[in-house]
């Protein structure tokens, strides 16, 4: 009985966390199958790799099921340590800087969360989440919320605590990026934010905290997608989109409306599906071509048709194109923002965030059109052998499964994920969803596609049967002058308003880790200068220290 009582005090199963456990395990299984098929080919320490993967899944499940905040922090911290180990599992030397940055940012946010937990214990007298109902009012309540928010933002990869994701993307194995920044870390980070909004804290709609979160979410959407537009490496491009999409989740939860919070949670799940699919499909391309530079690819749609179709579906999903799952969750977030007006929310803030969210979707679509052209369409690159073929069966099977989920959770969003997972998670029986019928929209889109294919087969197939090299004005374009796609949006970097911002971003001006490192090293150099070995200097500083102490004691 005592053991059962202890278990109940440490863990709690409710509608918010129970639906996450199967999906955490699902993503773990998908990545393990992908790794067995060849995704972990370059990893030498395979025993350690699979052990870390299984431990990551186990600690993630324990974290979302934990009711005790100390246990939650332990499992959360163990996940951060495993993240550090997995980033360097393939090449410890090449990934040393990225691993160190990740460990410091995630570990530092864990220390901040510990401080927030201490404040929560002081305010509520308990470490159990179901016993905490702290109002975000007064200095203590606001500080506690901000501490947990920083931990959630860092884990999920929201600005300004996001920089570990692009840094890790270039050096970490593709399966690691698919299971952690793309899926499990998003699930954990947004779960904590949702838990804070629904259970731990009392956050009124249109409150200062709600507006603050909305602005952070909108800023994350736009700033990260602007960085993604100019990337030439597909891994970094996907990494910045992993950051940008967090903004939608934060924005939905920040509305503090039922449909907005549900949309944020649904988008969290959708993102884990399509972003894992994108990373793994990109891994298929890199597996065959040994390249991640977009400028050195092209024309792979014919050679890798399964990967192309899956990448296309996931690209449309992340861009919010109906009838795929990404559109439906974004549509719910938009409705949550609009419902915030009836709750007395700031019109300026809500319309600004709504415009930012829609603008972000447009830029996301533009970015993925660039990526699709650079990798799968366009003129083939001379660097890629024409003998390139589709990835092995166990590498394309997981991406086919994930792409089918993108369709399934988009067309049957109301009947499946919303009904069984999302709506129960927010403690509601139903939501007022209006303006979009996913099944009917899918049917109409399918009819249009079938009609177009029928017309092509009947009247256009014979006329367009000729295949030839790309040419302009009758002259075949040399491979050296081919349009790769990476230059599509280079002109953006030359705009007067954005030129300086991009330059400063590339130098790390907006990187909280780099700026923190500069400050710490600057303080260290100052004390090194003082520590010069001259005895009179030490005596002077000792005297000044005693004067300060006497002054403080006198007061």
Image (cartoon, helix red, strand yellow):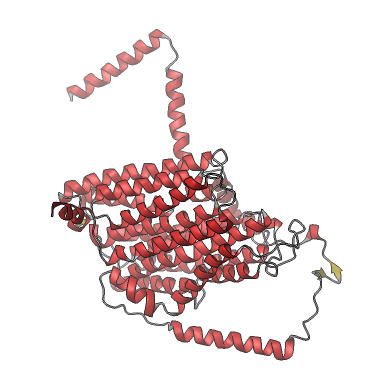
Residue 232: which quarter of the image? bottom right
Relative to residue 116, is residue 264 depicted above or below? below
**Along the line of sight, which residue is nearer the eye, 357 or 468?**
468
Q: How far from the left and from the top, in percent, is residue 246? A: 43, 60
Question: Which residue is depicted at the point 30% across and 47% down?
Answer: 73
Q: How far from the left and from the top, in percent, is residue 554? A: 18, 22
Q: Residue furthest left?
A: 1
Q: How far from the left and from the top, in percent, is residue 339? A: 33, 73
Residue 282: which quarter of the image? bottom right
Q: Is residue 222 visible?
A: no
Q: How far from the left and from the top, in percent, is residue 197? A: 28, 60
- In-image side of 76 versus 458 (left or right): left
Question: Which residue is depicted at the point 44% across and 82% down?
Answer: 438
Q: Quadrant of the C terminus?
A: top left
- In-image side of 124 versus 71 (left or right): left
Q: Quadrant of the N terminus?
A: bottom left
- In-image side of 285 versus 439 (left or right): right
Relative to residue 203, is residue 147 depicted above or below? above
Q: Residue furthest right?
A: 475
**Along the line of sight, which residue is nearer the eye, 431 or 89?**
89
Question: Which residue is depicted at the point 25% across and 47% down?
Answer: 70
Q: Is residue 412 visible?
A: yes
Q: Residue furthest top?
A: 535
Query: How many numbered circles does the render carry?
Result: 0
Question: Which residue is depicted at the point 43% across and 28% down?
Answer: 523
């Amino acid at each position: 009985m005592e053991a059962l009582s202890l278990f109940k005090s440490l863990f709690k199963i409710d509608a918010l966390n129970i639906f996450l456990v199967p999906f955490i395990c699902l993503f773990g299984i998908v990545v393990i199958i992908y790794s067995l098929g060849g995704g972990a080919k370059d990893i030498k320490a395979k025993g350690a790799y699979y052990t870390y993967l299984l431990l990551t899944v186990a600690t993630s499940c324990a974290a979302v099921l934990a009711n005790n905040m100390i246990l939650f922090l332990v499992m959360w911290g163990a996940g951060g340590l495993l993240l550090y180990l997995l980033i360097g599992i393939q090449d410890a030397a090449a990934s040393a800087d990225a691993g160190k940055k990740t460990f410091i940012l995630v570990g530092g946010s864990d220390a901040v969360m510990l401080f927030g937990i201490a404040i929560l214990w002081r305010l509520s007298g308990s470490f159990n989440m179901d016993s905490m109902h702290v109002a975000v009012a007064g200095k203590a309540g606001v500080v506690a919320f901000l501490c947990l928010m920083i931990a959630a933002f860092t884990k999920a990869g929201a600005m300004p605590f996001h920089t570990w994701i692009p840094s890790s993307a270039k050096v970490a194995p593709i399966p690691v990026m698919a299971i952690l920044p793309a899926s499990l870390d998003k699930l954990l980070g947004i779960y904590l934010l949702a838990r804070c909004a629904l259970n731990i804290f009392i956050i009124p709609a249109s409150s200062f905290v709600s507006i603050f979160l909305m602005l952070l979410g909108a800023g994350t959407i736009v700033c990260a997608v602007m960085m993604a537009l100019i990337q030439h490496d597909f891994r970094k491009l996907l990494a910045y989109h992993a950051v940008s999409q967090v903004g939608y989740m934060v924005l939905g939860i920040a509305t503090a409306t039922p449909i907005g919070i549900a949309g944020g949670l649904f988008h969290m799940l959708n993102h884990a599906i399509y972003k894992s699919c994108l990373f793994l499909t990109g891994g298929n391309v890199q597996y065959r071509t040994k390249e991640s530079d977009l400028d050195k690819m092209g024309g792979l749609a014919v050679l890798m048709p399964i990967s192309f179709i899956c990448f296309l579906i996931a690209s449309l999903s992340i861009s919010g194109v109906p009838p795929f799952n990404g559109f439906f969750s974004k549509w719910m977030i938009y409705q949550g923002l609009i419902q915030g007006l009836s709750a007395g929310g700031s019109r300026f803030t809500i319309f600004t965030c709504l415009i930012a969210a829609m603008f972000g979707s447009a830029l996301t679509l533009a970015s993925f059109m660039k990526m699709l052209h650079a990798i799968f369409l366009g003129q083939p690159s001379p660097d890629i052998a024409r003998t390139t073929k589709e990835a092995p069966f166990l590498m394309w099977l997981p991406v086919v499964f994930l792409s089918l989920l993108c369709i399934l959770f988009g067309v049957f969003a109301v009947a499946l994920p919303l009904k069984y997972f999302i709506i129960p998670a927010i403690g509601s029986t139903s939501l007022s969803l209006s303006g979009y019928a996913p099944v009917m929209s899918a049917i109409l889109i399918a009819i249009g596609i079938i009609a177009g294919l029928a017309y092509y087969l009947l009247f256009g197939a014979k006329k367009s049967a000729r295949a030839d090299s790309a040419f302009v004005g009758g002259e075949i374009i040399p491979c050296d002058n081919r349009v790769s796609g990476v230059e599509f949006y280079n002109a953006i970097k030359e705009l007067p308003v954005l030129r300086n911002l991009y330059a400063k971003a590339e130098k790390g001006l907006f990187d909280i880790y780099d700026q923190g490192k500069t400050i710490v090293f600057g303080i260290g150099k100052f004390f090194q200068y003082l520590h010069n070995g001259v005895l009179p200097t030490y005596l002077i500083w000792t005297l000044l220290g005693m004067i300060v102490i006497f002054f403080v004691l006198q007061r």
